[in-house]
Each structure stands twice: as structure tokens, then as C-alpha cells.
Image: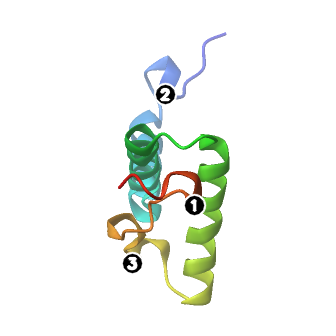
Amino acid sequence: MASSGAAGGRGGGNSQQKEVEDYLSRIKLREIFQGMLTHVVVHQPEDPVAYFHEELSRIKKEVEENNVDIASTTFLTSSNYVPKDRGDQQ
């Protein structure tokens, strides 16, 4: 039996897609991961998974300590994207 969701092409697919898009925009998920992925490609850290973990932890800490919404942070435009193992290659 076919689903009436987005995969089925009818029903509330557009509404659900808009909700997802709004959510992603509000939390800046695309920008976060695009920035981190760009940094990994450019700087090629030895352990990209560790880099992602460290950056996400740093972002979370920054948001919590400053009591700000993630959408208002400027971490993606900062110079914090220098992995410990490749800091000499900016």
C-alpha cells in the first residue's frame, strides 16, 4: 500500500518539507557542516572524525556558555578552524 507522505507525492509532503527546511535554516545545520567539511578538505587533518567531534563540542560549549541561540553565533566565520595536528598550514 502506498504512503500518502512525501514519498507518495500527495498529502502533507510540501508542509513537512517546509518544516524541515525551516528547522535546518533556524539551527544552521547546513552552514555548520559545510564549514567543517570545507575545512577538512582544505586542511586535511589526520583524523577528520576527531576534528568533527572537537568542533561540534566547541560549538555546543560556545552556545551554552554564552547562552545564545546557535543561529546567532559566528563560529563559522571565526579563525577557529585550525586543527591541532595541522596548525602550521593555514
Mark earlier in primary sequence (2, 3): 2
Q: Tell me the residue at 39%/52% (across/down).
A: 89
Q: Is residue 3 above or below residue 76?
A: above
Residue 53 image point, x, y percent: 66, 54
Residue 44 image point, x, y percent: 48, 39
Inspect the image, locate mark 2, and give the three-letter code of the amino acid beneath it. Answer: Ala
The single residue placed furthest to the bottom in the displayed view is 66
Residue 6 tag number: 2
Residue 48 image point, x, y percent: 59, 42
CA neighbours of label 2 inside 10 A, class few (<14), some (14 to 19), many (20+):
some
Say whether residue 67 is left or right of residue 72.
Answer: right
Q: Is residue 70 above or below residue 8?
A: below
Residue 71 tag number: none
Tag in front: 2 or 3: 3
Q: Tell me the residue at 65%/66% (across/down).
A: 57
Residue under pointer 3: 72
